[in-house]
Amino acid sequence: MQYEEAEKNKQDISLLEIFWIFFRIGMFTLGGGLAMSMVMRHELVNKRQLLDDDDFCSIVAMATAVPGLIAVNVGYLLGRRLRGWKGIILSVLGVVLPSFFIILLIVSLLLPYFYNPMVVNFLRGCAIAVVGQLAFASYIFSKRSLRKWSHLAVCALGVLILVVFKFHPIFALIVVSLVGYWLFPEKKV
Amino acid sequence: MESLLSLFISFMIIGIGAYGGGMVTIPLIQHEIVVKNNWLLLDEMAEIFAIAQMTPGPIAINSATFTGFRIAGILGAIVATLAVILPSISIFTLLTPIITRYKENKHFCRLRNNMQLGVLSLIFFAVWSYGSAVIKGFSDLVIAIIAFLFLVYFEKKLHPIVVILTCGVIGLIIF
């Protein structure tokens, strides 16, 4: 099934283009996988219309729910969706390589310059924007998956478990999923 | 050789345990690198987190490359980075046949649809943990809220990277 879809998309996007999109995203995105996925959404859903928002959100949800780095997980699933296993290799490389080279560059050459106040201030401004971007991710997901007040209540239970009781995230995911399973048999994605 | 192997094992553990986004992974990374293996001092670790947080890419990958390089040069950087992404790739490769098999099962679908609520809790938590690490005052909060509003209002037109770079320039001017 997934590979059929990948076949269908073959005409729409070349392997090189996949690598280039993900490389650019890896290059300019601070704040890790979730923030990154909003840039991917812009490139793949809004700009190129290679997949719709439903597909995209269920891919990000799957990537977040499964252990592993969210950025790599999202890259893996999107790469597969777009061009099968070749897509996986290129999208994951695209996500990982920029961080790898940037850190190598910093640790071997640029470490002294990194504490230049201008660099620090610029990066701090960027990091603050990432908070807004993460809030934007939660807005996109809320719009899709909170259909009733009771959905919000169950979701808030998860946040409570994390923020107040400081349990491990996987525990919150399991509790919320099971409570949801029990309360909302008809829930659509 | 021995240090390469323990680098590999430690970062694979970090790769599996990296759950719910960067900020949640920090204690685990710290435990593996500082407490268990004494590869770095706590001060050096704090430096890495500061750099990882402010450079592009996931924190786990950034700290893998950084620590690997410090311990065993370029080869160490490659080994640690591969180790941290390996779990993601192998978990999905193993999971795919299972997911494909139960795709039509109604209990599986019901669980998966409700899992989105759990994922949303994790995203809210990511906003909270990243926000409380980065936002230090009222002006920071205002910038973050304005960035959010721009992203929401110009959802289809505005590239998110533009918003981030603009905020970088604002940071340059006002801080």
Image (cartoon, helix red, strand yellow):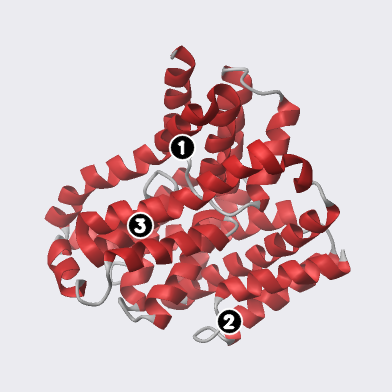
Query: Could you tell me how far apart the alpha carbons at marks 3 and 2 are, in whole angstroms?
Result: 27 Å
Residue position marked by numbered label 3 in the rendering: A91
Q: Nearer the viewer, residue B112 or A52?
A: A52
Label ID, residue B152: 2
Quadrant (top left/top right/bottom left/bottom right) for the N terminus of chain B: top left
Q: Chain of mark 1?
A: B
Q: Residue at x 31, y 44 (%)?
A: B89
Q: Chain of mark 2?
A: B
Query: Could you tell me how far apart the alpha carbons at marks 3 and 1 are, in whole angstroms?
Result: 16 Å
Label ID, residue B81: 1
Res B104 seen here: no
Q: Nearer the viewer, residue B169 or A33?
A: B169
Q: Residue at x 50, y 58 (%)?
A: A26
Q: Nearer the viewer, residue B152 or B69?
A: B69
Q: Nearer the viewer, residue B63 or A17?
A: A17
Which tag is nearer the camera, tag 3 or tag 2? Answer: 3
Mark 2: amino acid? Val
Q: Residue at x 38, y 74 (%)?
A: A44
Q: Are marks 3 and 1 on the same chain?
A: no
Instruction: Say few, some or many: other residues with alpha carbon within 10 Å of mark 1 (under 14 / 14 to 19 / 20 or more).
Output: many
Q: Are marks 3 and 2 in contact (CB under 8 Å)?
A: no
Res A130 seen here: yes
Give the image location of residue A110, x and y in percent. Answer: 70, 44
